[in-house]
Image (cartoon, coloured by chain):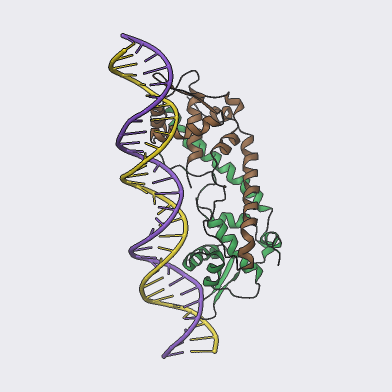
Chain colours: A green, B brown, C purple, D yellow
Amino acid sequence: MNGQFQIAVHILTLLHAQPGELLSSEYIAGSININPVLVRKEISNLRKYGLIDSKEGKAGGYSLGMPAKKIALSDVYKAVKVQPALGQAKNKPNPACPIGKQIGEHLDDLADEVDASIINKLKTITLADFGEKFKY
Amino acid sequence: MNGQFQIAVHILTLLHAQPGELLSSEYIAGSININPVLVRKEISNLRKYGLIDSKEGKAGGYSLGMPAKKIALSDVYKAVKVQPALGQAKNKPNPACPIGKQIGEHLDDLADEVDASIINKLKTITLADFGEKFKY
DNA sequence: TCATCTGTAATTTTTAATATTACAGTACAA
DNA sequence: TTGTACTGTAATATTAAAAATTACAGATGA
């Protein structure tokens, strides 16, 4: 699997911790310890959902797109999500087998139910809540 | 991510659908459409949890290790789980950054909470329930 | 008009997942 | 007691996905 969700939360947490400032992709990448291009790519996605604002040019950078209290972690999950949490097998079950023929559909339903319960859980936690866990 | 959970459920569903019979890894692999060695490997894991019985030798094969009503999908999830559902980033956040230093712990806590809610959800569904969705 | 940033495409490298090969060990049955 | 058909498992190769890197155009402020 991949660490997109963690990276997204890390970015948002940094922006939340330094309100008013514009942080650069290089600074953010330094804290996460990944490549700056990956940061810009992930932000480019989060921006579509209004979670982050960006400013181009010299002295440009990133800031939160809305108050941290308004950002539920479920919003981040939905913005980032490419695959169901249960994973996704890449095989194509044998359609000549009565089980194989039907199981794809049932597994998908199950994956949807599980994702819904994750979203319900994450709905109860805002970025502000998450940020409060940090001590300085 | 990977398809271990789906594969495990597929195997168990097949065994459940043909009670009394011993199914071979090759037959199972044919339905899932993956390599038989992968089936044997996955079963070798599920067997540790008592979910599957195996018999070696000629006319050997696999069967359920306990009644389908006793197998909750959360048991399968726990048996298969190697990574938290939210994924796992491979970066090591910068310990020189106050956020980077603490975020690993907080993200892990979050991942644990999410996994707990998945397990709660899957606890309510048995293999027997899942098997009932199929029509013949 | 230079320096410093974002935005994004293209490519390479690394890592994880899956498939394959190989073979020892077990059990049944002729 | 020997051949056949399985499981169990290790070792290796292949494929696919994730992440890093390179490169550069466009924006903006000094």
Q: Is residue A82 left or right of residue B101?
A: left
Q: Is residue B67 visible?
A: yes
**For residue B47, side relative to residue C10 (left or right):** right
Quarter of the image that includes the C terminus of chain A: bottom right
Name the residue at 58% across, 67% down.
A52
- Residue B9 percent location from the top left of the image: 51, 34
Identify the residue at image location x=52%, y=72%.
A26
Number of labelled discs? 0
Q: Which quadrant holds residue B28?
A: top left
Percent across and percent down for residue B8 are: 50, 34
The residue nearer to you, when weighing B8 against B91, is B91
Estimate the x, y position of residue A71 in percent, counting from the top left: 65, 61
Nearest the eye: A113 or A20: A20
Question: Is residue A50 something that shows in the picture?
Answer: no
Above or below C28: residue A52: below
Please say if A54 is above or below A101.
Answer: below
Is A31 in front, or is A92? A31
x and y percentages locating residue B106 in the rendered image: 65, 56
Q: Residue at x 57, y 54 (%)?
A: A78
